[in-house]
Image (tube, rainbow, N blue to C red):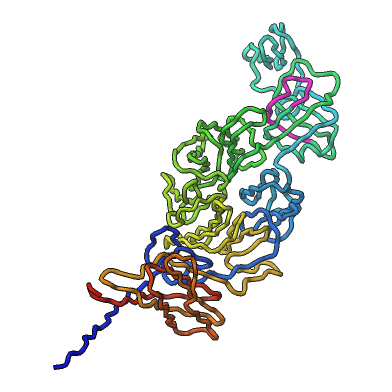
Amino acid sequence: MPLYPRLHTQLTEQEMIDGFGGYDHRLRIADGAWFDTENLSSDLAPMLSVRRPRGNTHLRAGALLEKDALAYVSEDGTLYYNFLPTAVTGLSAAPKQIVGMGAYLVIFPDKVYFNTADQSDWGSLEAHFAPQSASYELCRFDGTALRADYIQPLEPDGPQNAQYWIDTSGERNVLRQWSEAQGDWVAVETAYVRIGFETRGIVPKLFSAGDGVSVSGSSLGEVNGEKLLAAVGGGEGESDWVIVTALPAHLPDEPDTALRIDRSTPEPDFVCECRNRLWGCRYGLGEDGRPVNEIFCCALGDFKNWRQFRGLATDSWVGSVGSDGQWTGAVNYLGSPTFFKENRIHRVGVSPEGAHTISETVCRGVQKGSEKSLRVVNETLYYKSRSDVCAYQGGFPVGVSAALGAPSYHGAVAGEARGKYYLSMLDEDETPSLFVYDIAKGLWLREDALRVTDFARVDDELYAIAGGELITLFGSLPVAGSTREETVPWQAVSGLLCYRWPENKRVSRYNIRLSLAQGAAMEVYVQYDSDGVWRSAGGVTAAKAMTDACLFPVRPHRCDHLQLKLCGSGEVRIFSIARILEVGSDYR
């Protein structure tokens, strides 16, 4: 019987990847994850799809804030609201912090406010007044004149009812009034001095009753210092005046010419709004040259007053902090002012009685220079620490950025919209990357090398400043002259894929199932054994929109391992990648 060669059948099996896991820049990654991505989106996950085209307003901007409408500062220092210029101009070129408080916008470090509901209401948080002359008289709380019948250290003899005596026997003068009913001198709780000026109508425009001010240059030492304005008056029909608490024994014969009244605002490192107050922090030297490490807030509902101390729950407040290091960020989180250092989180417990407290948690804080990474997404606070991106819910932060791999990033700026956390950062070589974290799906994607310096979400649109231009990440065209990207180039690079498998299995091909919109294209490249050379494996271009998915095969060469790179432009959806294995025996 003749001998014939034995034929061995070639068995095959298929492994399907139909769920894509986003960006994973580690050495070993799961099937379906991508070592690098560009301009892909998680909107249709687990399908792989391309992000939306962006819009460009072609407007130049330097700072953003989200309110009912977009607020931004142009490069020439003009504040715009809802894309219209306001009366606020001449702002400095320094980096801005714009904070919303009710209908108001408050801009630091310029210390300027603007009312979005009444655009005629704007101006400076601070007020400074140095009159050419100032006169004094003792008065009551309502401003009516008060005459001291006696000014002496010894108790007067034979007083009459309701007469006043300035008791100068102690270190501080005390105003007393004779009470016929009690037969004794009764101390008057507070004494006042009315300061009059030659101006008419200037002072009421600068100051209000209750303002905490600093008075200097007065020849009456009792008038100088930190004061509360008990009343302010003046106008077209009368000279201006203010009332402060003081009790000088003698009034000067000549008007003062060096008096100065200042209502100042501190220089916060970072500031946020919480419970109808602005809260700030400061580390370094204070206005008096002394070192400070503190958290402070303005008076309730009054962002102009930071030194209003009347013993009321609505007063301004200052609290010292013992932890070392510079402040690195501030945010209103779940109704608590929350301040960060690189290794600390300090939260302020806001008390209705004004007895606010500061708590301290030793943990990963915000990285220095990444204060703009603080964003609340779906009630969770996200921020960039020195080592990773953290999620914080009031306890200890949890890292969520292991997929970003080994590179170290800094200068993080974040935005949030549609349940996603957008994060622009720089690596060690100052190369920018824009990452997107889909909170619900737990997926990271790297969009591109867009360097964003500020984000703001208005309704469902996310605005960003990139290269000094105001762009829209979801493609809206808010003003005339705006343009939109025509096509979006995209790319996805796989991790290392093994060619050989146990039991002498080898990859015979990859089948990519996809659909393309009209004019969209995809190219496939393969790199073998990490040699750095990407070799074309073909491509496809859609002359018309595909109604059904097509199958694109890739046949790799024999190798130890390989990487796939899919790239193209236009709207592409990748449904699955099937790995076809040819199966041998233990010997073959």
563 is higher (above) or lower (below) than 583: above
Image position, residue 57 (x, y; %) = 67, 65
User: Left or right of 370: which side holds 497?
Assistant: left
Please say whether residue 437 is one of the residues in the magenta stretch. Answer: no
Image position, residue 406 (x, y; %) = 46, 53
User: Which part of the image, by quadrant, shows the C terminus?
Assistant: bottom left
Image position, residue 347 (x, y; %) = 49, 40
Residue at coordinates 81% horizontally, 39% vertically from top-left?
201
User: Left or right of 445: which side holds 279?
Assistant: right
Residue at coordinates 57% horizontally, 67% vertically from top-left?
474
User: Which part of the image, by quadrant, shows the N terminus?
Assistant: bottom left
> In the rendered structure, which segment of residues is drawn in magenta?
216-233
Work out whether residue 144 or residue 99 is closer to the camera in this orientation and state it.
99
Instruction: For residue 212, say whether it is visible.
Output: yes
Residue at coordinates 50% horizontally, 37% vertically from top-left?
351
**Most distant residue in the front direction:** 2
Picture quarter containing residue 518?
A: bottom right
Image position, residue 572 (x, y; %) = 50, 76
User: Left or right of 547: which side holds 82?
Assistant: right
19 is higher (above) or lower (below) than 263: below
Residue at coordinates 75% horizontally, 16% vertically from top-left?
148
**Most distant residue in the left direction:** 1
Instruction: For residue 315, say whether it is visible.
Output: no
Picture quarter containing residue 182?
A: top right
